Image (cartoon, rainbow, N blue to C red):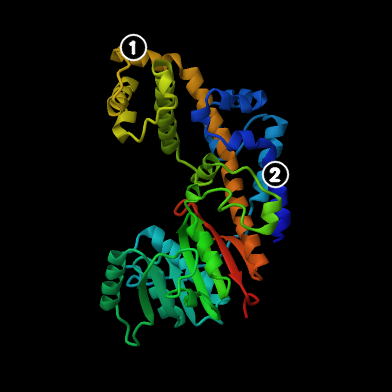
Amino acid sequence: MDFQARLEALTHQLQPWSPLWSRSILQGWPGSGAAYPEEWLAYARSLDEAGERRLDQGALVGVPPPSLHALLGALQELTALPWHEGLHALTVAETQGLSAKKTHELERVLALLAPRTRFIHHAVDIGGGMGHLARLCARTFGWTFHSIDRDAALQDKGRRWLTKTHPPGGDTLCFIQASVEDGLQPRIDPLFHGRDRASIGLHTCGPLALTQLRKSQGAGFVLNIGCCYDKLEAPRDYPVSRFGSAHPLPFTPHALALTTRGRHHKTEVEFARMKQVYAWRFAFDLLSRQRFPERGFVRAGDAPRTLYDGRFAVYARDRLERLGLDAGMTDAELDAFEVSVRVETRDLLLCHLLRDRFARALEVVLLLDRALLLEELGFQVELLQLFDPRLSPRNLALVASCHTVGD
C-alpha cells in the first residue's frame, strides 16, 4: 500500500469537514449543529427508524444529498484495508480460562506471526498481563519470550498458570514487572534490539503504542495493535511521521474520542437502546442549560440502565440529585419538558449519526501516520484488519519487518 498517497487522500477528504468531527456536538450545541449542511440534516430528518439505523451502519437510503453520498463513498474506499485471513486453532487446554474475545485475538495473532517471523528467536510483549500470548508464542515458535507488565498481581497469576500447564520441554518465558516508558531504560531496552527479536503490543493503550514503536527501532519485527486513542495528545502524539507532519489534521480531544467508537452493526434492540439513552441525555442537557445557564455544559454521567427504561422525570431527578441541583419542577413538568424538546433532541441524534461516519477515517489517519513513521525508520510495513470488529472493535494491526515477508 502507498501509505503516503492514502494519507494525503484521506486528509484531502477530511480537512473541509473538520468543524463537524473536531468538536463535541452536545457541548457545543446549538452552534455545533450549524456546521452540518442543511441538506444533510433535511435528508436525515426524512429518515424513518429503519433509515436511521442504516445511517448508523454507514449506508444511505433513498436519495441522499450528492455531497454526502460522494463523501461517504470516498471515505469507505479510502478506509478499505486488506484482511489477514486464517487462524491458528488453539486446543481446549490452551484456551482454558480465556474469554471468547481473547481466544479470537490470539488465534489470529498466532496465524499472522507464523509466516512472518521465521527469523525470530526472541520476543518481548508490552502490557503482557498474565502472559497468555507470550506462553503460546514460546510453545508454538520456540521463542525466548519476555512479557512486560506493570501489574505484579497479573504476572503472579501468569506464573501460576504456567506451573499448572507446564509442558515436558519446559517454557522459555520470563515475566518482567516494569512500565515501558520513553527514554532510556537499561533493564529492558536491550530486549527490543536485534534482527532476531520481535516486539509485540496487543492493544497498547494510548501513547504506549508510540512508545513501543520508538523502543523497537532496532528490532527485526514489530506488531502493534493500538487502542484508547482518546488518551493521546496532539501535537505530542500526532503527527509522528515526517510525511504526516506535512499533512496534518486538526485533531482535538473530541476528535480523538470519536476514533474509539465501535464499528459493529447494532441489532434493532441495541439501536433502540442507544436512541433511548441519547434521548434522555440530550433532553437533560437542554434542561440544565435552561435552568442552570451559569453552569454551562453539565455532565450527566453514566446512569443505571434501568433509568433509561422508565420516565424521563425519574432519570432527570436522579441526575439532578447526583449533581446537587434542584430544577424546581414536578415530575409532570419534567416529562412535559422532554416532550417539548423532542424535535431538538432528534436533531442532536441525527448530528451524532452523521458525525460518526468520520470515526473510522480518523482512526485510519492515525495509523497511516504510524505506518509512515515505521517506513521512515526503515521497516517494510503492512496495515491489516485482523480481528472481527464485533468482538474486538480496535482491529487494525501494524506489521513491520526488516525482512521480506516470508523470508
Q: Pinpoint residue 96: horizontal percent, then vertical percent.
A: 31, 67
Q: Is residue 311 left or right of residue 375?
A: left
Q: Nearer the viewer, residue 250 or 401?
A: 250
Q: Pinpoint residue 119: horizontal percent, then vertical percent.
A: 56, 82
Q: Residue at x 35, y 36 (%)?
A: 302
Helix, strand or loop at mark 1? helix
Is residue 387 something one can see in this rendering? no
Residue 60 to residue 387: above or below: above
Residue 78 to residue 116: above or below: above
Quarter of image, res 170: bottom left
Residue position marked by numbered label 1 in the rendering: 333
Q: Which of 117 and 276 is in front in this view?
A: 117
Is residue 256 something one can see in this rendering? yes
Q: Which residue is drawn at 64% across and 52% down?
A: 80
Mark 2 and mark 1 lie on one chain; the one further toward the N terminus is: 2
| Residue 74 marker | 2
Q: Pinpoint residue 215: horizontal percent, then vertical percent.
A: 52, 69
- Mark 2, Cα crowd under 10 Å, few <14 / some 14-19 / many 20+, is some
Q: In this view, does 73 lie to the left or right of 299?
A: right
Helix, strand or loop at mark 2? helix
Quarter of the image containing the C terminus?
bottom right
Q: Residue at x 28, y 26 (%)?
A: 318
Q: Which residue is drawn at 65% across and 45% down?
A: 249
Question: How far is disc 2 from disc 1 in space, using C-alphas?
Answer: 47 Å
Q: Nearer the viewer, residue 119 or 125?
A: 125
Q: Give, as a three-letter code, the residue at label 1.
A: Glu
The reply to whether the C-beta atoms of the residues labelled 2 and 1 are less than 8 Å apart is no
| Residue 11 marker | none
- Mark 1, Cα crowd under 10 Å, few <14 / some 14-19 / many 20+, is few
Q: Give, as a three-letter code, the residue at label 2.
A: Ala
Q: Is residue 6 left or right of residue 125?
A: right
Closer to viewer: mark 2 or mark 1: 1
